[in-house]
Image (spheres, rainbow, N blue to C red):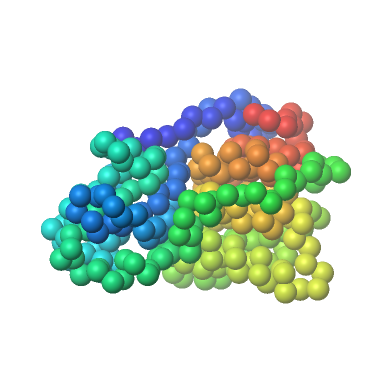
Amino acid sequence: MLPTSRKHIHRFERFRGLLPFEDNLGMEEPLEIRTLRNPDGTGAEAQPLSVTMRTPGHDKDLVLGFLYAEDLIESEKDLIKIHCCGSGPGSPARNVAIAWLSPESPSKKTTQSRRLPSNSSCGLCGKSSLAALDLKGLSTLPDPDRPFLKPETIHSFLSMIDRYRKNFSPSGSLHSTAIFSQAGKMLCLREDIGRHNAMDKCVGALLARPERHIDGAVALLSGRVSWEMMQKAVRSRLGAVIARGAPTNLAVEMARRFNITLIGFANHKTFNLYHNSGTLCTDRSTNEP
């Protein structure tokens, strides 16, 4: 069974308001993949190859499949061993995996120079070190002057995005991000096969406009909320993130750390409130589950 994190939150139900609720969140943690060619693992430093966000578990399978997909190995025989998450004597810290490559493996040159982007559909693209996960320099958002989100506003956002999403219905394979002003106006809608790409397209489109209007705005996501999606929200200084899908444990932690209202499992009748920075106004509004 894959690990989960249980959180005390509030669930909004129509005609009943916000009610205490316990939710299981899918676990999301980074895994840095490093490679080492020295067979005995001594006298050489493992080289960072890629960082990916994943649910912990089956990490050796993940590393093996990743190396094979990138043509760094032809088979398991090209690997001497893999140490993951503190397994074995002298092994790396949690969330680091070291692959000892055979001297005969086909990746003799490429592993010394490659820094591969990797992701979990919306993972840490282009990050080659766990140090790149540091969020220093990004400030916590202040509480808004007044609440501007109501349950009926959220429902109107959902209806609006359903009307304007032109590409999802024919294909069934695209994610979307819409950004709304605090007044409830749709500022931008973009679609892409990747959740993170759809968010980047939306933010980029607004940054290119003279008026911008990003600070304190609301993003509506068609899928789940991962660590990276919340990082993008923090970087763009969004006031709220609403998703049809589930947030991960790190997404909730980031929302609370940087004071961004986070809502998941949003539909026309209910939603889960994971953090309220003061943007959400209900009869039983709360600042922290």
Q: In this view, does 1 lie to the left or right of 25?
A: left
Q: Is residue 149 left or right of residue 222?
A: right
- The image quadrant of residue 73 is bottom left
Residue located at (71% from left, 69% from top): 206
**Which residue sits furthest right?**
145
Q: Residue 265 location in percent, x, y?
A: 55, 43
* Residue 200 visible in the snapshot: yes
Vertical order, 220 against 188 (above or below): above
Residue located at (33% from left, 37% from top): 86
Vertical order, 206 against 19 (above or below): below
Q: Which of the two residues, 182 or 255, is positioned nearer the viewer here? A: 255
Count of numbered labels shown in the rendering: 0
Residue located at (77% from left, 39% from top): 278
Q: Is residue 277 left or right of residue 271?
A: right
Q: Residue 87 location in percent, x, y?
A: 28, 37
Q: Residue 275 location in percent, x, y?
A: 66, 37
Residue located at (60% from left, 65% from top): 200
Q: Residue 261 location in percent, x, y?
A: 68, 43
* Residue 168 visible in the snapshot: no
State which quarter of the image contains the N terminus.
top left
**Which residue sits furthest front?**
43
Q: Which of the two residues, 289 or 58, is positioned nearer the viewer here? A: 58
**Which residue sits furthest left?**
77
State which quarter of the image contains the C terminus.
top right
